[in-house]
Image (cartoon, helix red, strand yellow):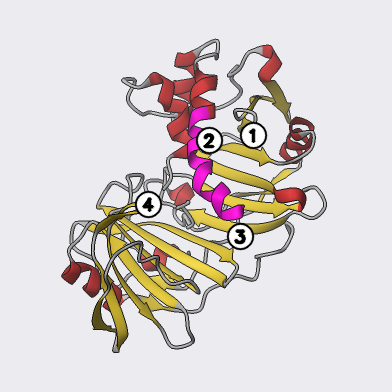
Amino acid sequence: MTRLSDDNTEDLIRESLEHLATRAPDGAQIRDALTRRSRSRPKMALALVAAAVAIIALGVPLGLRAYTSIPPASQRNADWAVLPYKPGWLPDGFTESSRGARPYPAPQERTWIGPEMGNLQLISTPLSDERSGPWTIAPAPNQIIVHGKVGMAAEVYGQGMMLTWSPDDVYLLSLTLFNVKDPRAVGERIAEAMVPDGRARVSGELRFGRLPADLELSGVKTFMKITGGATELEATRAGQPTAAAVVTASLSGEPPATDGATPVPLKVRGLDGAYLPEREGRLGHQNGAIAVRLEGGRWLTVSGKRDQATLFDIADSLQVIPGDYGWVGKPPE
């Protein structure tokens, strides 16, 4: 259930915020306050602010200034692996399950899971530099007030509740609640108890070594699976940190799904690995991938829209380092 929620959350956020944007009383004010993106897609502007990810996958970890050459677009976000906010209160039984980060101005994401398949996702997105402060962003029935600032609350197509507000002049927060009783009341209590963090980091077990000249690190995610902690890295075209990933690298206890591909044996990092060709299978279109089982039994996989030789070189130069999963399974500290 957790994995399914991770996979669907971005679409749910996008759809919900697009729906709300069509009902807001002053769409121009919303767009100006939340984003400087093109006005050619007004219904999607608010959605892109809150959901310009890829967790996630996002998901998305380390002191990333040391692991990327991407220059920060703003000194306030010079270390984009640091997560800016955390709940000061959550319902009993909710513990953190994933963290993800991308460079400014893309979002950072945290997820908690709880009883009865409950799921809470917090997305922190930098506001535009042009405007800040309270705005009327929803009709009265959808308005919430968080520490004197106006925000909005709306159902996510019957599956949950989303609350969106700004706790300061720097960030927009979006909290989505699934499978939680009385989600609006619970969400408002969480929003009121939200506090600055600044200590929590996205610190995983991988960093890129060699990348093609046109690619650069654009996202990191850590999360827990049945087989243990997992780390994912993404690389996009240089200067496009919010675009879809071109290459993804992962380290986890699960082997990649062959999904109808015939593995081509080859040595990877001095070990027996395989190349899985690009294919159309039961899971849909799958890019080519290099996979190898490392000492200790965990699987390193590199996939993406590059040829076999390029994927092999990326996999061969990846650095595997100690990661931090000490926060997994814990309530906010």
Q: Are marks 3 and 1 in contact (CB under 8 Å)?
A: no
Report crowding for label 4: few under 14, some 14 to 19, many 20 or more residues within 10 A (C-alpha). Answer: some
| Left or right of residue 181, residue 14 in this image | left
Which one is in front in this view, the residue at disc 2 or the one at disc 1? 1
Camera-side residue: 82 or 51? 51
Tag 4 residue: 72
Which one is in front in this view, the residue at disc 3 or the one at disc 2? 2
Label ID, residue 240:
none
| Left or right of residue 326, residue 183 in this image | right
Q: CA distance from mark 3 to mark 1?
A: 29 Å
Q: Residue at x 50, y 48 (%)?
A: 7
Task: From the top left corner, tell me how far across and down residue 49 is, in percent.
Answer: 46, 34
Tag 3 residue: 200
Q: Are marks 3 and 2 in contact (CB under 8 Å)?
A: no
Q: Based on the displayed image, in which of its 4 quarters is residue 70 positioned?
A: bottom left
Of the residues shown, which amino acid type is indicated by label 3? Answer: Ala
Q: Are marks 2 and 1 in contact (CB under 8 Å)?
A: yes
Q: Which of disc 1 and disc 3 is earlier in sequence? A: 1
Residue 62 visible in the current orientation = no
Figure quadrant of the C terminus: bottom right
Tag 2 residue: 12
- Kindly state the secondary structure of the residue where label 2 is placed: helix
As drawn, 128 above or below 62: above
Of the residues shown, which amino acid type is indicated by label 1? Answer: Gln
Tag 1 residue: 159
Task: From the top left corner, tell me how far across and down residue 113 is, in percent.
Answer: 69, 53
Q: CA distance from mark 4 to mark 2?
A: 29 Å
Q: CA distance from mark 4 to mark 3?
A: 19 Å
Magenta residue span = 1-15
Q: Which of disc 1 and disc 2 is earlier in sequence? A: 2
